[in-house]
Image (cartoon, rainbow, N blue to C red):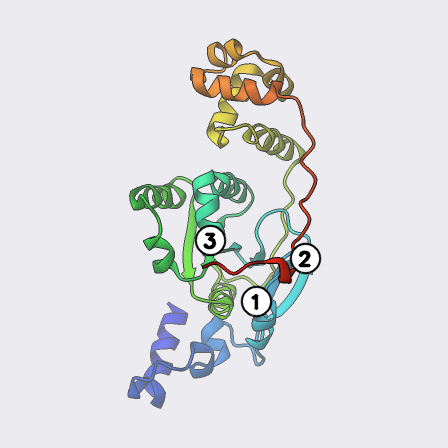
Amino acid sequence: MLIRHRTARALDLCPLAASGSAERSLNEVLPNKVLWGKPTGRKKMVRVIVDERERSHIPTHLKKLGLTVDFKMLDEGDYLVPGYAIERKSIQDFISSLYSGRLFNQAYRMRQVHRFSILAVEGDFFSALGKIKNPRVFWGALVSLSFEYDLRVFFTRSSEDTAELIGILAKHPPELRSHPPIIVRKPKSSRLRETQIALIEGLPGVGARLAVQLLKRLGTPRSIFLATEAELSARGGLGRAKAAKIASLLEAQYEEPDKKAAQLKLSEVRPQP
């Protein structure tokens, strides 16, 4: 109530608010003590932790927005701000991981560690959506991510938009607290389970749910890899075709790839008629 009351009063007294201008942010219009609900005389430092492996221009944009950026190795997510873990994907990677099932496994892991998980998808969403053959499958998967895995998905046009989103999340945590974001380490037992699931997901036609089913029924990854086609079908609960495909892969002899073909010189390439 204190923040709402002071905010309303500040907007009433502010000439920009009266004129209906929406160009400037709350940070520019309102005093710092109104935005944060504390009568501090100086601007509050907002910290963002960025994964060391993240390769984008977003950290540069975050610094331009006045945020403090620290680089650390993160187990889950690309960015951490108070109360939120944020994963960034390009629109192409988002659709690919959505259909392959990788995104569901990632969303599950983020939910185990963080209270609020955010996915920022960069790129031309409508153009990518127009190329999808069956949009119903896409929307169904998106609903499942939102309601079953508690993953909040935001679509942005560029890295600058993503930085703006992260900045807003950083300055508006779910609970106003003064402490910086905390890096939560997953327990070793959880890591072992996720590693086992990821290992079984490498088999053809096996997603996260089917991997869990096989591990529950057969016990260990070794038992799954040593199981015959009949055992995969009878004990593992797989269909005959899928069990045969997995057995065929596990029994196939490894073959070295053919030598790389010599690259043609530009002068040897004939133009197409």
Q: Is residue 214 left or right of residue 26?
A: right
Rounded to the nearest angstrom, the CA distance separating label 1 from label 3 is: 18 Å
Query: Which one is in front, 129 or 36?
Result: 129
Give the number of the disc on residue 78: none
Which image quarter: residue 81?
Answer: bottom right
- Residue 162 placement (x, y as % from top left): 49, 65
Rounded to the nearest angstrom, the CA distance separating label 3 from label 2 is: 22 Å
The quarter in which the N terminus is drawn is: bottom left
Which of the two discs, 2 and 1, labels the residue nearer the N terminus?
2
User: Tag 1, which secondary structure?
Assistant: helix
Rounded to the nearest angstrom, the CA distance separating label 2 from label 1 is: 13 Å
Q: Amino acid at mark 3?
A: Gln
Query: Which one is in front, 206 or 34?
Result: 206
Q: Which residue is mark 2?
A: 52
Which residue corresponds to the image point at 57% horizontal and 51% vertical from the top-left? 77
Q: Amino acid at mark 2?
A: Glu
Which residue corresponds to the image point at 48% horizontal and 63% vertical from the top-left? 169
Residue 220 visible within the image: no
Q: Which residue is mark 1?
A: 58
Contact flag, marks 1 and 3 (Cβ < 8 Å): no
